[in-house]
Amino acid sequence: MAPCPAITRRRKSMVVPAVKAAKETCPLLTFDLPYVTFYYNQKVLLYKVGAEEGEFEKAVESLEKSLAEVLGYFYPLAGKLVQDEEGVLQVDCNDRGAEFVVSAAEDVHLSELAASDASPLLQDIVPYAGVQNHEGRELPLLAVQVTKLKDGMALGCSFNHVILDGNSTWHFMSSWAELARGLTTISLLPFHDRTKARNTRLKLDLPPLTAHIANGDGPAHQNGEVKPPSKPMREKIFHFSEEVLDKIKAQVNAHLEPDQKPFSSFQALGVHVWRSVIRARELPPESYTVFTLFVDCRKRLEPPMSDNYFGNLIQGIYTVTASGMLLAQPAEYGAGLLHQLINSHNAAAIDAKSTEWEKAPKLYNYKDAGINCVAVGSSPRFKVYEVDFGWGSPDSVRSGSNNKFDGMMYLYAGKEGGRSVDAEITLEAETMKKLEADEQFLTGCAV
């Protein structure tokens, strides 16, 4: 897919850290390595600033300066993936920096990019679509694109997923925003000793670099080359207000035993989406369906790790049932499966899963999410609407096109605040059409 002609690149440069990296290398552990064949994680923040040329240039200057400063704290993002003489992958903290692109799409409005249906333009305002994480052996581990719009500005960021998870992504973003606002230091320093979580050295057989990257050309164009799915896909944001979430949660908890702990809002929303997607897919009742969740392990380890641990501390866990059983039983049946899945993943389970993977390291891809799946990434806990670079909260927050497949769902805090949630769901187009016509799904009310 060629870049959209509505978007023009003004300049590209490398932003190097303002201070030298504190360490020469950063180890990559069992929690980091499975994502080598995932794609760069992409986040898009839209702001109502920069419509005027002078205002835009001032914002770009602030972003570029503060990016250099924040990379000094989060120095692995400014490095390069390398394999040592034993084939163990690590980060060479060589301060080569992050890619920084300035572009313009002056006929594009914020509303086009913030629409509930994902705009194809999202592939062009965030870098490295279709680029896998192992290609960080040649490409920067962080790429940023700032795009001037007709009535605002888009900030697109691509993070190498081997380096960090969602928790660390938003730690980085909030710290970057603090420095842009003029703070002399960040409020929460990152913790970089990954060996405190698990101390392992694993040899990996990595895929070859794609030809255009191996030749030093970088991505074929700004958005890379994305293999189209076999069936048309659609990505759409569904907003769940506090009122709707309360209805969903109340229904799931309506028939509990007196001494039974209520299901959480996440468990209630998770089973609500799971059941709704299965209805929309119209699967045979005997077919299996999987719910996959990437769970944060920081507080589950013994001893627990603090929130400022910088890296990946997530594991993919899943539960499975028959589609007919999920729909025939009350909602609390599915919620119970999620409750058991989440609560049973303690320190012992984390260690067992890590040990199993270390015996035969497997590099994951989409099919590993499970058959007829609903898979959840990101979290409404992340304070995405508090990423203020000095010109206010984002107007909207979206994901790029990477790491999306039939059944993938990213959860974000709702812009209105409180307990509201935005669910960014990717489905086959025909399934999505049925889901968005499902009043029970949209309103949380049984029909």
Image: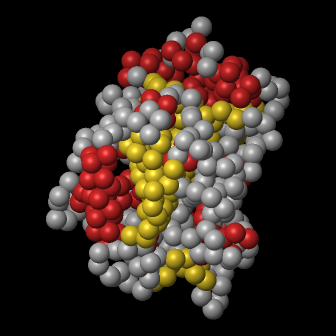
Q: Is residue 380 left or right of residue 207?
A: left
**What residue appears at the point 54 percent right and 61 percent down from the top-left corner?**
161
**What residue appears at the point 63 percent right and 71 percent down from the top-left corner?**
217
* Residue 165 visible in the picture: no
Q: Which of 169/258 is in front?
A: 169
Q: Residue furthest top?
A: 447
**What residue appears at the point 29 percent right and 78 percent down from the top-left corner?**
19
Above/below status of 236 relative to 189: above
**Residue 72 in the image, given as x and y percentages of width and height:** 32, 73
**Residue 431 in the image, given as x and y percentages of width and height:** 71, 26
Applied colour scheme: secondary structure
Q: Is residue 316 left or right of residue 64?
A: right
**Residue 93 in the image, given as x and y percentages of width and height:** 44, 80
Above/below status of 286 relative to 142: above
Displayed quadrant of residue 200: bottom right
* Residue 410 visible in the picture: yes
Above/below status of 47 relative to 257: below
Q: Residue furthest bottom?
A: 85
Viewport quadrant of the C terminus: top right
Displayed quadrant of residue 49: top left
**What residue appears at the point 73 percent right and 71 percent down from the top-left corner?**
211
**Residue 340 in the image, given as x and y percentages of width and height:** 56, 41
